[in-house]
Amino acid sequence: MTSAAVRAWRWWFAIPLSLRIAVGVWIALLVGVFVRVLIQPPMTQSVVPIYLYAGEQWRAGGPLYHQKTGMDLYRNPPGVAALFAPLSLLPPKPAALLWRLACVLAYLAGVRSLVRDLLPPLTAGRRAVVWVSAAVLAIPAVNNGQINLMIVAAALLGAGACARGWWAAAWWLAFAGWFKVYPLAVGLLCVLVAPRQLGWRLAVTTAVLFGLPFLLQHPTYVWDRHVEFVHEMKTDDRTGAEVSFLRAPRDWTVLPRVWFDVAVPRAISQPVALAAAAGLAAVVWVGRRSGFLPPLLLGLLWIVLFGPATEMNTYSVLAPVAGSVAVGSRSKWVSACGWVASGLLLAAVVRGSFPSDAAFKLVELQPIAALLLLAGVIGGITLSASASSPGAAGPAAGPRPPAGS
């Protein structure tokens, strides 16, 4: 055995067992998904062909929001199609593998930033819980190549970067919003913690990212696609769809559908979403001395509970949230919220591996889990605020400024 192999062997067994288990879970996940992508047809369990088709249309100057036979409708801003234009030049399988690899690498970096920069110091076992939760509960997004994985990665990196540099934070938070617009909620909540440092930078970076597509295609074409995008989002109303329909909303409105057979119309759900956003903003403002972890967690929770396009796989963005709530607080009841929610989300992932027409739909598990996590996060903020005096020093007294500020 070479000296390098010996060092690697010793390094591996020097790592705590819990972290070795977490590494094993991640390896199993990635090997399983990447092998499946290699051996199955490109359209199987994947939304990447939708993005690649949009990239082809972008290069050809064609309509983006025209549904191709056998595919779902492309529903992201026009600039995202420009991102996939180079990938659309590749054969479908290499393109799908490259996209998933980019998402996973960004996501791994985001979870590392969460553990290093945002959560309190954790034991090896608790760090392993965060890493395992981030893997297992994100399986649906990794498997089908959804953009949601890149969105949560950008949100994690943006909130974590606030400890090191405001520009890096602004770029990542703007990038999260650039993919679907409404994930800007995370960035806007982070602005409440450091409005002077982050507010104008987030505005600049968001404008640059949304303006960039106009430099990559004919401006008139890009403008028309934005008009088309706004129109499609206004008319894409699935509130009355059957609950068994895979694209029926899976946000909080699914609870009255399942329990009372009441479909909540947009005229009610949209004002509720705005009121919830205002309420969460007030919570972040009151607890802003707790730093950037609360706005990150609350922003991701708002995305799934009140966002305009929540599906079953959208709940993958809660994978790092569940682990953080479960092990990131000293409060037993906050941790209990995290553990119970993690169990419900895991049950939903397992249920999703069975045919959609099987018995026991269990569609209410995910919003219930999200509500539990919401209660845990708000409870943690309340406990932190009550435990901190106005003159307290250290991390609880406010966000860590970036180096050199």
Image (tube, grey):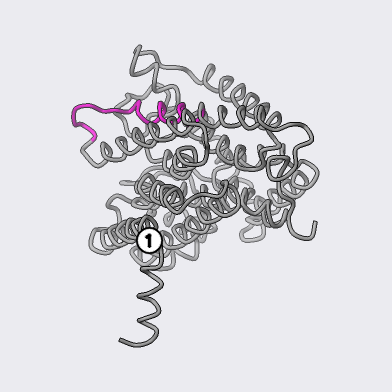
Residue 324: give x, y in percent of width and height.
49, 42
Up/down of 359 relative to 7, above or below: above
Residue 176 visible: yes
Q: Secondary structure at mark 1?
A: helix
Residue 174: give x, y in percent of width and height.
64, 49
Up/down of 97 relative to 71, above or below: below
Residue 105: give x, y in percent of width and height.
47, 61
Magenta includes 370? yes
Which sits in the foreground, 356 or 142? 142
Which sits in the foreground, 71 or 329? 329
Magenta includes 224? no
Classify residue 365 by image quadrant: top left
Q: Residues within 10 Å of mark 1 (few under 14, many from 20)?
A: many
Residue 222 visible: no
Identify which amino acid the numbered label 1 is placed on.
Ala
Judged left or right of residue 294, residue 3 is left
Residue under label 1: 96
Q: Quadrant of the C terminus?
A: bottom right
- The residue at the point 39 percent across, 20 percent down is 255
Which sits in the foreground, 234 or 5? 5
Q: Which residues are magenta?
A: 356-374
